[in-house]
């Protein structure tokens, strides 16, 4: 466990070095946020009948999405692990006296955390003080905020274990780009990154609720804005935990399976 | 120009060496805008219209912009990855050759997998055109083609400006994405749904408005725009490339090798 912790800390420090990139990233995210909100505003301004989620709730959805992008993107650009696998340097990793799954998990987790810490706080801080109608509303109530924090963290663990599955698949396919792109696009759509889940048609929502993706992004954000009531939120966190355990178990067993068959490519 | 096509042919051959990966990437590139289009469709299913624009009309706009983006990403990719050229000192090699720098940078990379994106947007375009109730004429078709061409020039110009910044910063800047990716996302809706300042900025500074709004009004018989005006406005978009070329010149003159 201590080995994993120190890998986690090292990576966290490494990630914190890229501050200029973070500032640039913040600016980009702000632009996106404004853009998306303006589009939604235009849609809402002539809406017939009441939409299933209010514009206020939607705005907090958008800002949270922009702030915690590093937490919810399925495919977080990290070519290092891919190169390890395709170049054969994986052999070194296998020599280390600690489990590969835990090691990589810590690595990926730290990467996402450092990127999110640098970006989320400034974005949220500014978004809370923007002029109306762009201002991000405060959480629905304090209990909702606490539940949001818990849901976000479990969601983070879930997304890391989901992305671990993607890395493991590279052991089999050896070519990361194509299949990952598809997986990423599909997963992000199902997580409500393109359009929020409440705005999807009913038949699609049925599908989305069965799959794990929406628990990582859509669920915590809607808890924040109070769109999901408290009792449902508590139950949802339970489901999240179940998913997390399932995904961890799946990832670990898949990892041991592929490692048994791994062919080291060249030297 | 001959040289340019030679570059294209060579790079095409080299990318075809990894055939499976190429097709998978192409398929992926097909799916990316497809999911955006699906999102658009679901939004319209829920709301019906956006500031008086119907789905078919926005789809036309979407297709034009995505087509322009795909083409310019395919051919102007060299500018997008220009920072590696500068940081590695490889730009020196281009300078000593007896050919223009622009052709050579353009020729340094083509991304043929963007064809997937192009196919997707062509399909959307065909679909939108067949659904629209507007009456078609030769002039309108011409305007449509001009819209796409003009869009290609604008996106290429932005790529070029972003590359020029590398002369000063050495590193590539993520900020440039606001104008390329962001410009694409924004311009897929007709510009007048946004706030005034956004519309103004993207009409007079970066002329997306000349591509997707003014000509669109003409094609769809909306408003009172006359044919001449809407024919001219995509040309204004094409003219955007001129200041970009000038800035590029300035940048090349400013260039100092990183050594190595």
Image: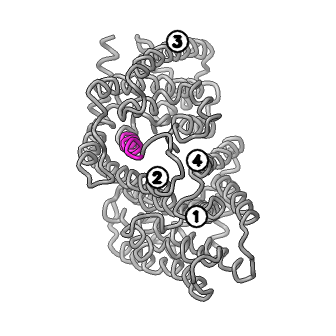
Q: Is residue A265 visible?
A: no
What residue would you read off at disc 3?
Answer: A249
Separation of disc 2 and disc 4 at Cα?
Answer: 12 Å
Q: Nearer the viewer, mark 2 or mark 4?
A: 4
Marks 3 and 1 sit apart, C-alpha to C-alpha, by 49 Å
- Split into 4 quadrants, where in the image is the N terminus of chain B? bottom right
B29 sits to left or right of B50: right
| Residue indicated by mark 2 | A40
The residue labelled by disc 1 is B53
Q: Which residues are magenta?
A: A55-66
- C-beta proximity under 8 Å, tags 3 and 1: no
- The reply to whether callout 1 and callout 4 are in contact (CB within 8 Å) is no
Mark 2 chain: A
Label 4: chain letter: B
Above or below: residue B201 compared with residue B58:
below
| Residue A130 locus on image (x, y percent) | 26, 52
């Amino acid at each position: 466990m201590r080995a994993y912790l120190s890998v986690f800390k090292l990576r966290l420090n490494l990630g914190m070095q890229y501050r200029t990139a973070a500032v640039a990233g913040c600016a980009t995210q702000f632009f996106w946020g404004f853009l998306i909100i303006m589009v939604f505003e235009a849609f809402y301004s002539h809406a017939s009948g009441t939409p299933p989620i209010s514009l206020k709730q939607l705005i907090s959805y958008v800002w949270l999405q922009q702030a915690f992008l590093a937490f919810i993107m399925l495919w977080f650009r990290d070519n290092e692990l891919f190169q390890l696998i395709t170049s054969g340097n994986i052999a070194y990793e296998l020599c280390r006296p600690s489990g590969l799954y835990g090691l990589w998990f810590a690595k990926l987790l730290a990467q996402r955390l450092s990127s999110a810490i640098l970006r989320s706080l400034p974005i949220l801080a500014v978004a809370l003080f923007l002029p109306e109608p762009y201002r991000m509303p405060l959480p629905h109530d304090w209990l909702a905020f606490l539940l949001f924090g818990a849901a976000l963290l479990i969601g983070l663990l879930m997304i890391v274990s989901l992305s671990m599955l993607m890395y493991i698949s590279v052991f089999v396919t050896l070519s990361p780009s194509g299949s990952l792109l598809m997986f990423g696009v599909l997963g992000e759509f199902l997580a409500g990154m393109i359009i929020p889940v409440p705005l999807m048609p009913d038949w699609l929502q049925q599908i989305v609720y069965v799959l794990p993706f929406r628990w990582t992004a859509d669920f915590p954000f809607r808890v924040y804005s109070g769109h999901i009531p408290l009792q449902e939120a508590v139950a949802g966190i339970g489901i999240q935990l179940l998913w997390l355990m399932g995904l961890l178990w799946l990832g670990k067993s898949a990892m041991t399976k592929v490692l048994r068959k791994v062919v080291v490519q060249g030297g | 120009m001959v040289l340019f096509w030679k570059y294209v042919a060579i790079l095409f051959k080299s990318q075809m060496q990894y055939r499976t990966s190429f097709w998978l990437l192409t398929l992926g590139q097909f799916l990316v805008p497809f999911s955006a289009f699906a999102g658009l469709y679901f939004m319209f299913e829920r709301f019906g219209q956006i500031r008086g624009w119907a789905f078919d009309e926005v789809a036309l706009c979407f297709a034009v912009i995505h087509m322009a983006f795909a083409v310019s990403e395919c051919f102007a990719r060299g500018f997008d990855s220009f920072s590696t050229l500068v940081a590695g000192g490889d730009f020196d090699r281009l300078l000593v050759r007896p050919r223009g720098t622009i052709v050579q940078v353009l020729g340094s990379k083509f991304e043929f997998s963007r064809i997937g994106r192009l196919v997707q947007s062509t399909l959307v375009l065909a679909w939108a055109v067949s659904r629209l109730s507007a009456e078609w004429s030769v002039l309108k078709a011409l305007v449509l083609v001009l819209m796409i061409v003009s869009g290609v020039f604008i996106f290429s110009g932005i790529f070029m400006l972003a590359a020029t910044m590398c002369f000063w910063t050495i590193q590539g800047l993520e900020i440039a994405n606001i104008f390329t990716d962001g410009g694409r996302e924004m311009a897929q809706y007709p510009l007048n749904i946004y706030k005034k300042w956004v519309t103004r900025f993207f009409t007079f500074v970066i002329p997306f408005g000349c591509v997707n709004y003014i000509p669109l009004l003409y094609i769809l018989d909306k408003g009172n725009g006359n044919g001449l005006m809407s024919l001219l406005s995509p040309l204004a978009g094409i003219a955007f490339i001129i200041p970009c070329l000038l800035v590029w010149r300035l940048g090349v003159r400013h260039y100092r090798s990183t050594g190595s």
